[in-house]
Amino acid sequence: MDAGALRRLGEERIDWRFKGMPADAAGMTVAELAAERRNLFDGGFHPPLVVLDAAALEHNLTTMRDWCERRGVLLAPHGKTTMAPQLFARQLEHGAWGITVANFAQLRVARAFGVRRVMVANQLVDPAGLRWVAGEVARDPEFALFCFADSVRGVEIMAAALRGAPRPVDVLVELGAPDGRAGVRDVATAVAVARAVRDADGLRLAGVAGYEGAIAHGATSESLATVDRYLRDLRDLAGRLELPEDAILSAGGSAFFDQVADVFDGTRTVLRSGAYITHDDGFYRDISPLRRAGDTPFRPALHAWAQVTSRPEPDLALLTLGRRDVSFDQGLPEPHTVRHADGTRSPATGSTVTALNDQHAFLRLGSGTTAEVGDWVDCGPSHPCTVFDKWQLLPVVADDTVIDLVRTWF
């Protein structure tokens, strides 16, 4: 990646745009604030505030790298999870083959920070965006772009915009499933799409891709069997197409990447798992392949700290945490710890977040939980993909000390 572009992130000035940042840090650069090593609770940061745990991040990066090396698969983590170039850099430093994105806007972020190998997990059909891609391919001889195709018409649009580019864009035929998302639904269409790619100037047939997470959402035996069937279909489709020797098969969200490695064994496989870097306290924790297999698990690296703003009922606390701050599409945040006014902590035993409003969380207190107005509560979000987009700047903490700040671009 572009070290200079990453370094310049530290030159951005702190101001009112960045929620949760200390008021007395206004005018400081991000790098200057990080260098002060402020305490999260006594350093002027104000809740709600989502933070990243440095040790958990490193654990997850290392765990996924080691797992991929053992299984002989490549990893192009989905950047849409974090949209944080600093974290892209960490993933690449830990052996990632490339970075995956979902659309032109995300692709432009990746390229602005010098990511050289990018997979767009969609069919690109916007002519203006494709003209920009052609210019980027011409500008940077080290830029390698992979994208999907599931229709002859889509291939025609790409070919028209990319004709004359100095190097071809690699295209993977995408296989879908009935009632699923994008992707061809039958072999005949896949063959036609592959033929259109081979015949197109500016495109190169590079493999087959799909996304198993769209067809199963749990770890029941039925869901796992459905995923296996789909992955076998994807593998078999690759065998029916006239693919080059260096062709890749790509699949694997953060829930079933073990099955991808099992079914694709012996092929050049590129996983696209993205949520592993922070994991979570809900959806992915409950469905993680590492947990199912009894391997070293990922650790939740996202913590949403909020204050108790009201105690209107004996067992109810209202927190300064709402839908504007944390995810709620795949489960509500889980309360873990209460930090009291004197700095001591106690577990939020038996407590549950029962609902979120725009700016409030309803915390029903368990019999063993003590929480007073002004106390801080640590909640673990579920589904990290819809947490990052709510924060432009996230502190990275080690033992309550802010050691870095991560910028997101949504």
Image: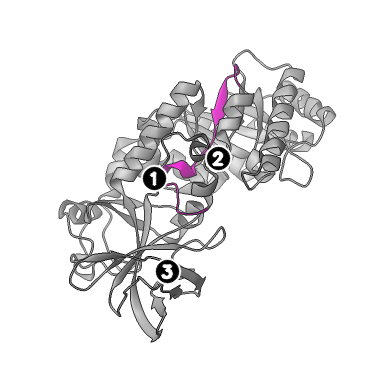
**Rendered location of residue 267, percent (x, y):** 60, 18
Q: Which residue is mark 3?
A: 351
The amino acid marked with disc number 2 is: Trp
The amino acid marked with disc number 1 is: Arg
**Rendered location of residue 58, percent (x, y):** 32, 39
Q: Which residue is mark 1?
A: 299
**Rendered location of residue 367, percent (x, y):** 39, 73
Q: Which residue is mark 2?
A: 132
Residue nearest the observer in this picture, 152 or 404: 404
Q: Which residues are magenta?
A: 265-282
Residue 148 falls in which quadrant of the image? top right
Of marks 1 and 2, which one's residue comes earlier in the chain? 2
**Mark 1 crowd level (few <14, some 14–19, many ≥20, 10 Å Cα):** many
Which residue extends farthest top?
245
**Mark 2 crowd level (few <14, some 14–19, many ≥20, 10 Å Cα):** some
**Left or right position of 181 against 390:** right
Residue nearest the observer in this picture, 298 or 386: 298
Of marks 2 and 3, which one's residue comes earlier in the chain? 2
Residue 376 falls in which quadrant of the image? bottom left
Report, in whole angstroms, how far the alpha carbon at label 3 lies from the one at label 1: 21 Å
Report, in whole angstroms, how far the alpha carbon at label 2 lies from the one at label 3: 51 Å
The residue sitting at 29% across, 44% down in the picture is 55
User: Does the rendering let one see residue 142?
Assistant: no
In front: label 3 or label 1: 3
In front: label 1 or label 2: 1
SS at mark 2 in the image: helix
Q: Which mark is residue 219?
A: none
Of marks 3 and 1, which one's residue comes earlier in the chain? 1
The amino acid marked with disc number 3 is: Ser
